[in-house]
Image (cartoon, rainbow, N blue to C red):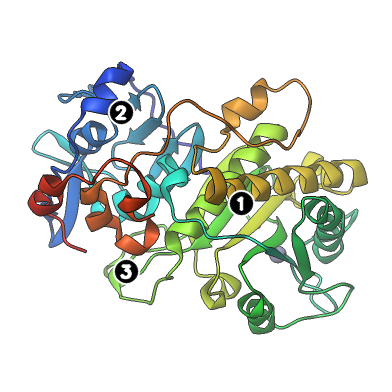
C-alpha cells in the first residue's frame, strides 16, 4: 500500500572511520523553499560523515557510513534510516540539481533516528502499558476476535517481562472495560519517570492485503502527520508539538527495530500521528500497530497466543533497549543486529566501539538543547567555533 514504486540507481558512498572523527561539523547551509527551511542531502551526508559531493543519478540516494545508513527518495517522504523505514514530515525537494530535506526533518526525524543514543533519555522507572480500546469499544475485528482482547493479552504478557527487568508497570486497563483516552494519558503523566506504550492492531478498509508493523509518535509542531497524503498549506499550522519529541522518536526507533528484527512482518515504518493518547501524554509515548486484523494470514497470527507472546517479547526488548540508551549512551541494536542473533530475543545491553562524543554544538542549535546531554559530561570540550558559526538558531 505504501511501497515506493521508484525503481532507480543507488549511489552508495563508503567512508573510513578516520574521516568520521575528523569531520568538522557545524556548517549547516539553510536553503529557503517557499519560505521554509531546507538542507541539502550533501550537507546532511557531510554532517553524518559521508564525503562531500554525493551525486545521486537516480531517484534514490543511499548514504552509508561505518555507523549509519540513510536512504532518501526524490519527491517522497519515505526514507530508510539504519535499515528501518522511516517517514519524513515533508517530501524531499529537488532544486537546482540538489536534493533538499526539510530542516524540521533533519532535527525531528533524522537526528533522533540516526543517533537515538544522543537523545537525552532520562531515567526510566515505569512503563505505562496501554491496551487499546476496551468494553463497548471493540476496536478492529477479525473472524478470530477483537482488537481490544488481543491488545490486552499482549500487555498482560509484556508486563511480567518488564517487571523481571526491574521496571514498574502500570496498565491503563486491566480488563475488558473502556477507559477514556485522556485518562490513559493522565495515568502516564502521573507516573514518575515513565514511558507510555499503547498497543493496537490495524485494519485497512481499502486494501485487504495490507500487512505489517508500524509505530507512531506525536507529529512535530508545524508538520503534517504521515497519513496526510497531500502536504497542504494547513499542514504548516502551528499545532503544539511535544517537549519530548526526540525521546518519543528514540523510543519508536528502539521498539520498532526490535519488532521488525525479531518478527518477519512487513516494515511499514516509523510514523507520526496526532492520536489523542500521543497528544495528551507529556512523557515519551508511542503507539504500536502490531499487524492487520483485516488480512487473512496476519489476523490468524494475531489470534495465536504464542505469536502474541513473541510480539510482547519483542516490544519488551525494545523498551529495554530504550532504557539502556539513557544509561550507556551507546547506539541501540538495530534490525540487522537482531536478525544476526541466533537465539531469539536475548535481552542484553549493546556495547559498541566508540564512546559518545560531545553533542555537536551546531546540532544542538538545530534540534534544541533539551534533547541532548550537556557537553560537559564528556572529556572533550565542545567546539566553540561551530557554535558561533552555526547558521541555524532554534
Ligand atoms: Zn486500535
**Which residue position holds label 2?**
61
Q: Quadrant of residue 203?
A: bottom right
Q: Is residue 166 visible?
A: yes
In the image, taking residue 15 as reference, residue 174 lies left or right, namely right
In this picture, is 64 found above or below 162? above
What's the CA distance linking mark 1 and mark 2? Answer: 32 Å
Q: Residues within 10 Å of mark 1 (few under 14, many from 20)?
A: many
Q: Which is nearer the N-term, disc 1 or disc 3?
A: 3
**Camera-nearest label, 1 or 2:** 1
Which x, y percent locates residue 294? 75, 51
Per the rendering, the mark at residue 222 is: 3
In this picture, is 39 found above or below 228? above
Total residue callouts: 3
In this picture, is 192 found above or below 290? below
Which x, y percent locates residue 362? 20, 49
In this picture, is 86 found above or below 155? above
Residue placed at 67% from the left, 47% from the top?
320
In the image, taking residue 185 as reference, residue 270 lies left or right, namely left
Residue placed at 16% from the left, 26% from the top?
52
Q: Residues within 10 Å of mark 3 (few under 14, many from 20)?
A: some
Query: Which sits in the foreground, 241 or 359?
Result: 359
Amino acid at each position: 500500500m505504501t511501497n515506493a514504486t521508484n525503481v532507480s540507481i543507488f549511489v552508495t558512498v563508503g567512508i573510513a572511520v578516520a574521516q568520521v572523527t575528523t569531520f568538522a561539523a557545524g556548517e549547516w547551509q539553510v536553503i529557503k523553499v517557499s519560505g521554509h527551511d531546507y538542507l541539502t542531502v550533501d550537507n546532511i551526508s557531510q554532517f553524518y560523515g559521508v564525503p562531500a559531493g554525493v551525486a545521486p543519478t537516480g531517484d534514490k540516494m543511499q548514504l552509508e557510513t561505518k555507523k549509519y545508513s540513510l536512504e532518501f527518495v526524490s519527491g517522497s517522504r519515505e526514507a530508510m534510516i539504519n535499515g528501518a523505514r522511516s517517514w519524513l514530515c515533508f517530501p524531499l525537494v529537488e532544486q537546482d540539481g540538489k536534493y533538499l530535506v526539510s530542516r524540521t526533518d533533519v532535527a525531528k526525524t533524522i537526528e533522533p533516528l540516526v543517533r537515538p543514543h544522543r537523545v537525552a533519555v532520562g531515567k526510566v522507572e515505569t512503563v505505562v502499558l496501554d491496551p487499546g480500546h476496551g468494553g463497548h469499544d471493540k476496536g478492529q475485528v477479525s473472524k478470530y476476535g477483537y482488537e481490544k482482547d488481543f491488545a490486552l493479552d499482549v500487555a498482560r504478557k509484556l508486563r511480567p517481562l518488564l517487571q523481571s527487568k526491574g521496571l514498574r508497570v502500570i496498565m491503563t486497563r486491566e480488563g475488558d472495560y473502556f477507559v477514556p483516552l485522556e485518562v490513559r494519558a493522565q495515568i502516564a503523566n502521573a507516573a514518575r519517570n515513565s514511558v507510555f506504550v499503547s498497543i493496537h492492531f490495524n485494519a485497512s478498509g481499502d486494501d485487504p492485503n495490507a500487512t505489517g508493523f508500524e509505530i507512531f509518535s506525536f507529529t512535530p509542531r508545524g508538520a503534517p502527520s504521515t497519513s496526510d497524503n497531500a502536504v497542504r498549506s494547513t499542514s504548516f499550522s502551528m499545532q503544539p508539538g511535544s517537549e519530548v519529541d526526540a525521546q518519543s522518536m528514540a523510543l519508536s526507533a528502539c521498539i520498532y527495530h526490535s519488532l521488525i528484527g525479531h518478527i518477519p512482518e512487513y516494515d511499514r515504518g516509523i510514523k507520526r500521528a496526532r492520536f489523542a493518547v500521543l497528544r495528551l501524554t507529556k512523557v515519551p509515548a508511542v503507539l504500536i500497530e502490531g499487524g492487520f486484523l483485516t488480512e487473512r494470514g496476519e489476523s490468524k497470527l494475531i489470534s495465536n497466543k504464542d505469536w502474541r507472546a513473541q510480539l510482547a517479547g519483542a516490544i519488551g526488548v525494545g523498551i529495554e533497549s530504550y532504557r539502556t540508551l539513557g544509561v550507556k549512551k551507546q547506539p541501540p541494536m538495530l534490525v540487522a543486529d537482531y536478525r544476526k542473533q541466533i537465539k531469539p530475543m536475548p535481552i542484553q545491553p549493546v556495547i559498541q566501539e566508540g564512546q559518545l562524543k560531545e553533542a555537536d554544538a551546531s546540532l544542538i542549535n538545530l534540534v534544541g538543547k533539551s534533547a541532548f546531554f550537556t557537553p560537559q559530561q564528556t572529556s572533550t570540550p565542545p567546539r566553540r567555533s561551530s557554535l558561533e558559526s552555526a547558521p541555524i538558531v532554534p
